[in-house]
Amino acid sequence: MKEFDDIWNDIYSAGEQLNRYPWSSVVSFLFRFYPREQPRSSVKILEIGCGAGNNIWFAAREGFDVTGIDASEPAIQYAKMRFEEEGLSARLDVGSFRSLPYEKDEFDIVIERAALTQAPKPVAFEAVREVARVLRPGGYFYSEIYSDRTSTEGCENEAGLVLDAKGPLSNVGQIAFYSKSEILQLLGREFSMLELVHAEFAKHVASHVEIIGNWSLVAQRE
């Protein structure tokens, strides 16, 4: 069971998926839920699976205290270079989601976008327990995970992964697709669900339509 698919090192090393701007869904979440009673400089935000750092780049520019972790060294190297060039401050680490190198109750907000969904399901469950550990009580967790309504060819293996999926999410290595019940199980008892949204996007390709299904959730640490 591979916790991290090395295809992402190849993708980043080739200069692909080095996103420069934040996802609008992350921007919307952050401005809705960050604690306004605190100065932004004291609001600590962690992104797991930060990739090229585009989301925390935005948060740093807005004055938040940011940390990012990713399993890909090329991605973190790129993020460090960009932050240094722009005079922005961040802690950027290469590491595992299932053993975060941070203190208990350290962060006010933890975000992840389509990172856990590319890990084996047992690893994702461990990672969410780690998120609960490093997130302060009352803190917020935002996550986006691909749903089992996505059009794909391929069977799940024992780790809940589809390998080399064919369809709208091809060429990005291993992917896990989640049902609603699995999303609720993933959060466990450590979190209260505040919002759970399912969106489907229809991609018209030649004579057929492909569906990309996506869960987005906001949860609060108990």
Image: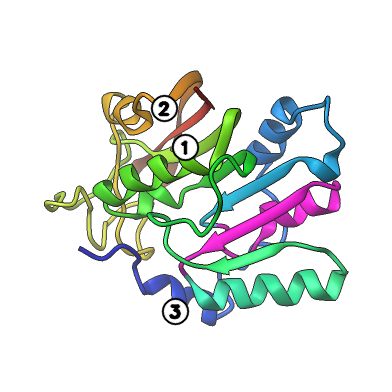
Specify whether 3 is left or right of 68: left
Q: Amino acid at mark 3?
A: Asp
Residue at horizontal 76 percent and vertical 40 percent from the top: 43
Q: Is residue 13 above or below residue 133?
A: below
**173 or 93: nearer the viewer:** 93
> Are the residues at dot 2 and dot 1 in contact (C-beta closer than 8 Å)?
yes
**201 or 47: nearer the viewer:** 47
User: Does the segment drawn in magenta span residue 82?
Assistant: no
Q: Give the mark, 1 or 3, whose residue is nearer the N terminus.
A: 3
Q: Give the mark, 2 or 3, whose residue is nearer the N terminus.
A: 3
Q: Is residue 44 above or below residue 97?
A: above
User: Does the segment drawn in magenta span residue 61?
Assistant: yes
Residue at horizontal 38 percent and vertical 54 percent from the top: 98
Q: Is residue 164 above or below residue 62?
A: below
Report, in whole angstroms, how far the alpha carbon at label 1 lies from the one at label 3: 31 Å
Specify whether 130 is left or right of 21: left
Write down the residue under mark 1.
Answer: 132
- Residue segment shown in magenta: 50-71
**159 or 141: nearer the viewer:** 141
Give the image location of residue 160, x and y in percent: 20, 47
Q: Using the image, tell me which numbered label, if any, was put on residue 10.
A: 3
> Are the residues at dot 1 and dot 3 in contact (C-beta closer than 8 Å)?
no
Helix, strand or loop at disc 3?
Answer: helix
